[in-house]
Image (spheres, helix red, strand yellow):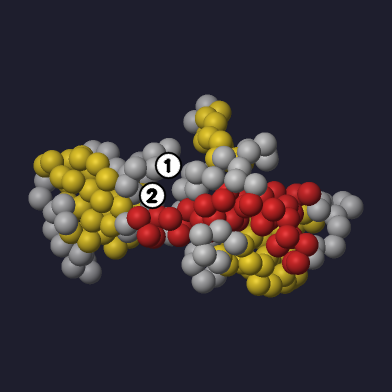
Amino acid sequence: MSDDSLSMDTSVVRCTQREDGQYDVVLSATLFHPQGGGQLSDRGAIGGMEVVRVAAVENEVVHVCERAVPEGPVRIEVCAASRALHARLHSAGHLIGYCGDELGWHAVKGHHWPGEARVVFESASGARVFDGQEIEAMVNAHVRAGLSRRTVMEGETRKIGFGDLPLHGCGGTHVASSSDIGRIRILKVKEKKGQLSVHYDLGDA
């Protein structure tokens, strides 16, 4: 996802009914981000018909709608509120990952869903004690710094970073500046089977 736009004109290439009565809609081009990479899909509308979820299926982005959408030209609208929340949560996960790296912990998985957001780490040799309050102070310093998002393509891999922080391969949505994330709260740090799960949520943007 390299475009922050929330609306565009495109075309419905195919609309087929599912066994559950909903419809799979494929567009010639889309702004909707599919579920994946630890992030929920965008919501919104295609030609005024609600999009309830979006999935990447093989080489296509499939938009699941409550009602059929006629083939041909159409206007699409991504829900601004859900896009902003998912981008804030995902970007917060990146900042937590950066801070963990500084303490000798390597982020191996992120789950950025509202109400259950967490980053999972594994320790490297010489890793320091992972203190939730220390990490919270570190990540919020990055938020206050207003670090601009950087996007770099290396071959077919898109890499995302903030300010001078390291770039990481990621296909999700992210805020334009770290200040857009708002306050990050570390809720719990839990260690199990050699992995450390850092649970977090957000304050107001």
Dividing the picture into quadrants, the one containing residue 96 is bottom right
Observer-nearest of 150 and 108: 150
Query: CB of mark 1 within 8 Å of CB of mark 2?
Result: yes
Amino acid type, callout 2: His
Rendering coords of residue 25 (x, y %):
22, 51
- Residue 8 horizontal/vertical position (percent): 24, 41
Compared to residue 126, the image places residue 2 above or below, namely: above
- Residue at 50%, 48% (x, y): give it: 175
Identify the image quadrant of the N terminus: top left
Question: How much space separates mark 1 and mark 2, taking CA atoms?
Answer: 7 Å
Residue 86 versus residue 159 in the image, above or below: below
Q: Name the residue nearer the viewer: 164 or 127.
A: 164
Q: Give the secondary structure at mark 2.
A: loop
Give the structural element (helix, strand or loop) at label 1.
loop
Per the image, the residue denoted by label 1 is: 1
Q: Hey, what amino acid is under mark 1?
A: Met
Q: Residue at x 55, y 28 (%)?
A: 154
Residue 190, horizontal then vertical, whole percent: 72, 71
Where does label 2 land, which residue?
33
Q: Is residue 34 left or right of residue 77?
A: right
Other-residue count near label 1 (Cα within 10 Å), few / some / many at <14 / 14–19 / ≥20:
some
Q: Position of residue 24 (x, y in %)?
A: 23, 55
| Labelled disc at residue 35 | none
Left or right of 188: which side holds 83? left
User: Is there any visible trace of residue 18 in the rendered image?
Assistant: no
**Residue drawn where x is 62% and y is 52% of the image:** 143
Q: How many residues crowd around disc 2 within 10 Å: few (fewer than 14), some, or many (20 or more)?
A: many
